[in-house]
Image (cartoon, grey):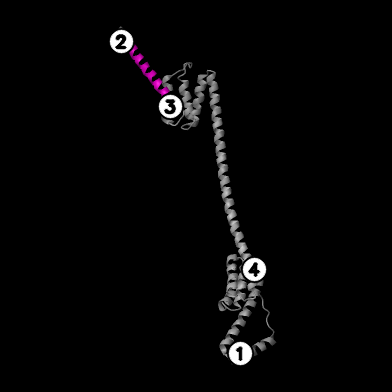
Amino acid sequence: MGRKRTGPGKYFFLFLALVIISVGSGCTAVDGILKKQEAGFELEEGQRYLSSGNFDRFVEINQKVLSDFPKTPPGDEALFNLGMVFSHPDYLKRDYKIALRFFKWLSIDFPQSPLENKSRIWVSLLESIERCDKELALNQNRLRETKLLWETSRKKIEEMTARQEEEKAIRDLFVQGKALLTAGDFDAYADYNQKLLTRFGSKAPADEALFNLGLTYSHNGNPKKDYGRALGYFRRLIKDFPQSPHHEEAKIWAGILDMIEQSKQVDIELQKRKKDLKR
């Protein structure tokens, strides 16, 4: 890539040669030779900028040479230099795609260049890097998708576990409550279900607490049996929990208790009339 400056003696012979050429072919050919010689000095100067880490200046010099010699040497050397600098690990603007473009350009436009073989090696290397980058990006996407799937599955498992634990806790609560009923402690059983109703409000298993309260105040063994109160609990369940598994049974209970309450009103009315007749 780099070129050594010629000594003073060689410059004399070069000047002499240029004079001879100018006599034979005119000033146009001399201008072309001088311009190519100047480009050689610029490329040599560029190597010093590259060694000192001034990559941007190195790029500017080689781009100028390439602009002056797009199809003839030393344009091939400028292309090779540009490919090298855009592959340089210390260049902040390093870009393998740009470097690859310069090396391919050299191989296409300068097939006879002594740098063409090196350029093809660089093309092969950079294409391998490009393939690796694509595979890496693909694997990173797969990794992200796998991680997202794992996170989603983990959350679902946690939610399911929490739901199962909550359902078990609720079942345990009702088992404890039924033990009170079995023991015949109706007051404690009613209080227990009332606390569950307050705790769960308008969501399950508040419907089961309402059903239990309705049964408690309908129970023949309960000294505080109260059909009117029981009817209120069953009606609340029917209204607030239409999807409850106790919904249909609550409707049956409500119908029976409503009939009993109506019968009680009829009995009260009859007793009242009997008293009126005795007067």
Q: Which residue is mark 4?
A: 121
Q: Earlier in the sequence, mark 4 or mark 2?
A: 4
Mark pair 2, 3: CA separation: 42 Å
- Residue depth check, mark 2 versus mark 3: number of the one nearer the observer: 3
Q: For residue 48, which numbered disc appears in the image?
A: none
Name the residue beneath numbered marker 2: 276
Q: Which residue is mark 1?
A: 21
Amino acid marked by disc 1:
Ile
State the quadrant of the C terminus: top left
Mark 4 against mark 1, which lies toward the viewer?
4
Front residue of 234/225: it is 234
* Rendered location of residue 39, percent (x, y): 61, 80
Disc ID at residue 248: 3
Q: Secondary structure at mark 2?
A: helix
The percent coordinates of residue 18 (x first, y second) are: 62, 89
Q: Residue at x 56, y 31 (%)?
A: 168
